[in-house]
Amino acid sequence: MSMLEVPLILFLVIVAPIWIIAHYVTRWRMAKTLSPEEEKQFAELWRIAERMEERIDSVERILEAEGPEKEPTR
């Protein structure tokens, strides 16, 4: 074996797999977190959902106040 083959084999057998695994674990962890833009969109969707819930509650209260005889037709 030449002087270059031994370090190359050690690199390919030991260092390269560890390096590749560490690289993809880091990518996986980064993908799990939300970007600032995604956090902003999520917060906006949350506010919209809360407003929609309030509107639905208001409509339900109005319908209940009108009485059970006025059930919506489907």
Image (cartoon, rainbow, N blue to C red):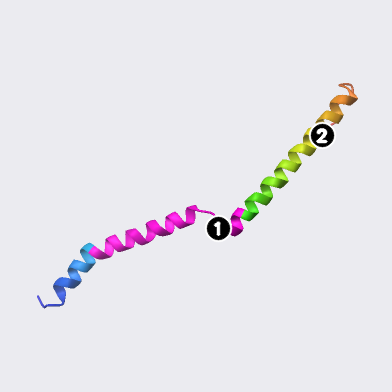
Residue named by callout 1: 35
Residue at figure coordinates x 28%, y 61% from the top left: 17
Residue 31: in magenta span: yes
Amino acid identity at mark 2 = Ser
Name the element at disc 2.
helix
Q: Which residue is pictured at 71% across the width and 41% down the height?
A: 50
Question: What span is in magenta?
Answer: 15-39
| Residues tagged 2 and 1 counted as in contact (Cβ below 8 A) | no
Q: Which dot marks residue 27?
A: none
Looking at the picture, does residue 1 appear above or below residue 55?
below
Amino acid at the residue labelled 1? Ser
Most common secondary structure along the magenta stretch? helix
- Give yes or no for residue 73 being in the magenta stretch: no
Most foreground residue, 67 or 61: 61
Please state if 22 lies on the left or on the right of 41 as rendered.
Answer: left
Q: Which residue is mark 2?
A: 58
| Residue sitting farthest toward the top | 68
**Could you tell me how many numbered marks the image carries?**
2
Instruction: Please provide percent x and percent y for residue 71.
Output: 86, 26
Q: Position of residue 63 (x, y in %)?
A: 86, 29
- Point out the tag, 2 or 1, that comes first from the N-terminus: 1
* Residue found 33% across the figure and 62% down from its top: 20
Inspect this view and state whether residue 70 appears. Answer: no
Image quadrant in which you'd find residue 23: bottom left
- The answer to whether one can see residue 28 in this image is yes
